[in-house]
Amino acid sequence: MESTKELTEHSSRVERKRQDSFGMFDGYDSCSEDTSSSSSSDESEEEVAPLPSSLPIIKNNGQVYTYPDGKSGMATCEMCGMVGVRDAFYSKTKRFCSVSCSRSYSSNSKKASILARLQVAGKPPTKKAKVLQKQPLVAKLAAYAQYQATLQNQAKTKAAVPVEGFSWGNYINSNSFTAAPVTCFKHAPMGTCWGDIAEGVRVEVPNSDCSLPTKVFWIAGIVKLAGYNALLRYEGFENDSSLDFWCNVCGSDIHPVGWCATSGKPLVPPRTIQHKYTNWKAFLVKRLTGAKTLPPDFSQKVSESMQYPFKTSMRVEVVDKTHLCRTRVAVVDSVVGGRLRLVYEESEDKTDDFWCHMYSPLIHHIGWSRSIGHRFKRSDITKKQDGHFDAPPHLFMKVKEVDAAGEWFKEGMKLEAIDPLNLSAICVATIRKVLADGYLMIGIDGSEAADGSDWFCYHATSPSIFPVGFCEINMIELTPPRGYAKLPFKWFDYLRETDSIAAPVKLFNKEVPNHGFHVGMKLEAVDLMEPRLVCVATVTRIIHRLLRIHFDGWEDEYDQWVDCESPDLYPVGWCQLTGYQLQPPAPQSSRDSQSSSSKQKKKAKSQQYKGHKKMTSLQLKEELLDGEEYSFLQGTSDQESNGSASYYIKQEP
């Protein structure tokens, strides 16, 4: 009878151990049960039959986990740490994945190697090593796995930095806002490899609803996406949103399903719902079958996408912020999320700086100005300072090649252009000089400096210059020349009065990419009038590839026209991910005092145009002075065009 009782207890222990071997649940069981093992490796060595093909499968972007039933689940090899289907493991107790692991275990080589790694050669064992010696091997392996994971986490990019006083999650939830998807920003981290991350994707995240002293995890599903940020809900809460929380998908605390099993991390259900199910393993098998999760190499892709080729001490040519018509030499002082803080080379105290993205059209390699005939301010420094070196030309954004041999832009031609000193306005402009490689010097009519110091360099393919009539067709207010009295402004009259011709329509860039933006989407955008600031912003108008960006909490006069592919636009959560400071929505009175001076200048400039009557109706062209006839596509003002389109079509004779 006694032996029968012992056999029954042994069988019960084996069955309980079998039930508790669900791969993504081992950590939870280890919190409440003794995982010590004294079994020898001389157990029966039986071959396991192949698994039936009808088993349910959880797909994990290429990785396949197969669960024979809700009880047996997964197992972890006590020798090599490999995670696999329990029934495919070696021996009756399924402690090892192969014969070799079973035999290696008996030699105790794994125990010796772990202890050797955790103590410094020639020194007494560390406290961590002493603790390992007192624990059963399974606990030692778990501690070592956690130790290795800690080292890996320390080598990762720095964790997301929260913005004090502002929460994107609360801002979006309280106003039912939508955010532009990460795929709209090809220059941003993960912009080109975001994949199928969407609502319903499951991840493993820290469990904040737990009383255990150690950090534990649980599975959550994405309820809503807002840029990099995701609203998560723990599995088991169903329609209960009481513990929903926002998390940056690219942060260090979010992992694909299966990460806990491979990393030796405990997976524990939240305390609030622990009473709901008696068999959590069966629950997880049912909920996760067929579910999607992050790719297994997701964190690696995030890390790779946040590696930037520009390094500190590199020398570049950048626009002179005090004289837009020329460039100066500047040195890269810091790189944050691909944004460069450039310090002009002559600045001794390093306070004379300029911020821009590494893909900005405002920066170029050393020698660029001379090669195209652009004005350049020579530095008083006769030779490079120690440690400074020229940035390689291949690091800079390439522009499209153009053919200027045939019909091309000429000095004096008229066009419409975004005013670089007042980015909320598209103005009447003139080509003042034609440079090499397709570059043009543009001046804003009626407000040019006598010495041309406010001319601005645009490439012929720039999305910031437009043919005559663009604003009229798209119902955008065109800013006429300062002091021009004949209102409402008509291009036909102005061209005749100034004895000028319009730049040919066919020379302008008419490509419209499939950008994915829609009116009302939230994002983070650079205030280009104070480019060190990245602000909470909204897309308020879309004209083909042109976006009207409104800074939340500010008046409309501070809006800016920006191209859909501008490197100065970022997904929600970009600042948190990169550690850049985000400027939250704020009334004008509470704006950062350091930026108030530039805003006042901008406001003063915009008030120059206050007296002009606003154009309120679409007027047809009478004719163009160059003798060619064009028909213009006339439709709604906000054309959310996400594909190839032209907003002006030449009629062939």
Image (tube, rainbow, N blue to C red):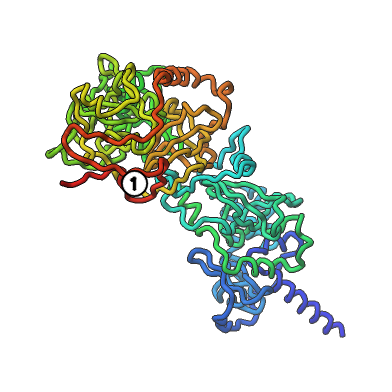
Q: Quadrant of residue 2?
A: bottom right
Q: Is residue 332 left or right of residue 159?
A: left
The answer to which of 302 and 185 lies nearer the viewer is 185
Whether residue 310 is visible: no
The answer to which of 14 and 550 lies nearer the viewer is 550
Q: For numbered disc 1, what is the local secondary structure?
A: loop
Q: Is residue 426 left or right of residue 55?
A: left
- The percent position of residue 488, horizontal first and vertical second, equals 35, 25
For the point 30% across and 36% down, the residue is 620
- The percent position of residue 483, horizontal first and vertical second, equals 33, 16
Q: Residues within 10 Å of mark 1 (few under 14, many from 20)?
A: some
The answer to which of 570 and 209 lies nearer the viewer is 570
The N terminus - image quarter: bottom right
- The percent position of residue 38, horizontal first and vertical second, equals 71, 70
**Residue lying farthest right?**
1
- The percent position of residue 629, horizontal first and vertical second, equals 20, 40
Q: Which residue is mark 1?
A: 512
Whether residue 337 is visible: yes
For the point 67% across and 64% down, the residue is 26
Q: Amino acid at mark 1?
A: Val
For the point 43% across and 20% down, the residue is 610
Q: Is residue 396 left or right of residue 554?
A: left
Q: Is residue 296 above or below residue 512?
A: below
